Image (cartoon, rainbow, N blue to C red):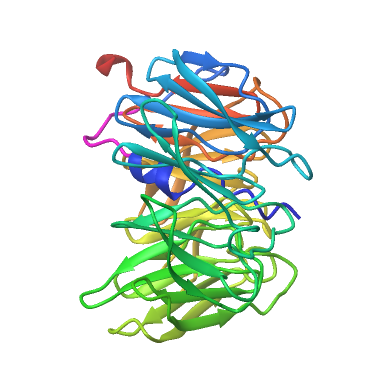
Amino acid sequence: MLHFLLAAAFPALLLATSPEPVRLSSTWPPAGPPILFEIKGLGNGYSSPLIASDRLYVTGETDSTGYLFSFDLKGKLIWKIPYGKEWTIQFPGPRSDPSVVDDLIYLTTGHGYILCLERQTGKKRWLVNMVNDLGGVVPTFGYSIPAIFDGDKLFCSPGGEKNNVVALDRFTGKLIWSSPGKGETAGYGTPLLIILQDRKILVTSSEFFILGLDASTGQLLWSYELAFKGEVPCNTPLFDRKNIYWIAGPGNGAVAAKLSPGGDEISVAWKNPLFDTFFGDFIHIGDHLYGSSDALRQYLSVNPADGTISDSLSFGIGSITRAGDMMIAYNQRGQVGLIRPEEGNMTLVSSYRVTKGTKEHFSHPVFHEGILFIRHGDVLLAFNLVANEQK
């Protein structure tokens, strides 16, 4: 049960969006688009790179030690620092992407350490252990939720009965508020911060619940209990100003829940058990949701109005990300596909297979200004997707 690997998580995708449209090449050679650079020696890991300004950050594990790497955007190493013990049990290596706010970078390790470092130098500012300092309980496959932020607050999920979900001061690591949640171990998916007129809501997951908390106080506003208790939620929820969408994997599938104007209640609008991506995430483009289905072993487009399936594409299962008005799927067989979405219809424009790297194809792809970054274990590849006339 590989429920921990929401690796190319929210912070990376948020920062890795091209500010201007880039016309992508519509035809890739069988070996794939040109490789701009290749980085070897990252060690084990399922985290994805984070692009922040003129730097690229990525983590890896070698001989049980975690390392944070800083590169320029041409793949040149600027520095590499050890940050402590990293996960070496099931599927060794970091699970969570780095997060950057201003001049600080934040890491969450598989064993539950949260570190705040100076972004330019990697120098440590503070460290909190979610187990020893906050009474947390390590999830089966290690801590995987990256830090997310609201102003000076950093949200994290130690799990356990007391400090189940907490807000820390992002400058000091000191506790601001704590919520007992449902007393379970943490989920694996990146939380969502919803900003309403009079309230901010943190939507996160624990082992068998989706939770909605007041981001200012930690008050539990509402919860949704999963019907199937075999898997733990791994995907980032989405919000379209009316409904919250989440996918909780095989056995639970996708749910749309209408959020009340004040944010203190939800009501289920629809469920689709076949839209059940495990840890590949899903996206919203135009008037449809897109992601893979473990049950059907295909990529799907789903109408967010009623949850019905509009189209399917035989491309296995895996992760998905947006690239301008196109989509990029990276399946667990190592195939990368450029997909054109048109009112719910999906067309596979071109594809190739990633042949370099190690272990499973679980890390999420990151698209940034015409470059596709794919981390495959020990290797990070940067592919040029820009059409010839724009190069």
Point 60% across, 79% down: residue: 182
Q: Position of residue 378 (x, y in %)?
A: 65, 24
Would you say residue 277 is visible in this rendering? yes
| Residue appearing at x 38%, y 52% in the figure | 170
Give the overall secondary structure of the magenta segment: loop
- Quarter of the rendering containing residue 366: top left
Residue 236 against residue 367 in the figure, above or below: below
Pick the quarter of the image with the N terminus. Answer: bottom right
As displayed, is residue 111 above or below residue 305? above
Q: Position of residue 18 (x, y in %)?
A: 28, 35
Location of residue 334 with respect to 327 vertically, above or below: above
Q: Residue at x 31, y 29 (%)?
A: 369
Residue 16 seen anywhere in this rendered image of the structure: no
Could you say which quadrant of the image residue 153 lies in? bottom left
Q: Measured from the top left, where is residue 248 in percent x and y?
A: 60, 66
The residue that appears at 46% across and 52% down in the rendered structure is 147
The answer to which image quadrant residue 55 occupies is: top left
- Is residue 20 in the magenta section? yes
Q: Quadrant of the C terminus?
A: top left
Residue 293 is situated, as x and y percent measured from the top left of the image, at: 62, 57
Q: Is residue 153 magenta?
A: no
Magenta part of the chain: 17-24
Horizontally, residue 328 falls left or right of residue 2, namely left
- Name the foreground residue: 250 vs 147: 147
Q: Nearer the viewer, residue 16 or 162?
A: 162
* In this picture, residue 252 sits left or right of residue 17: right
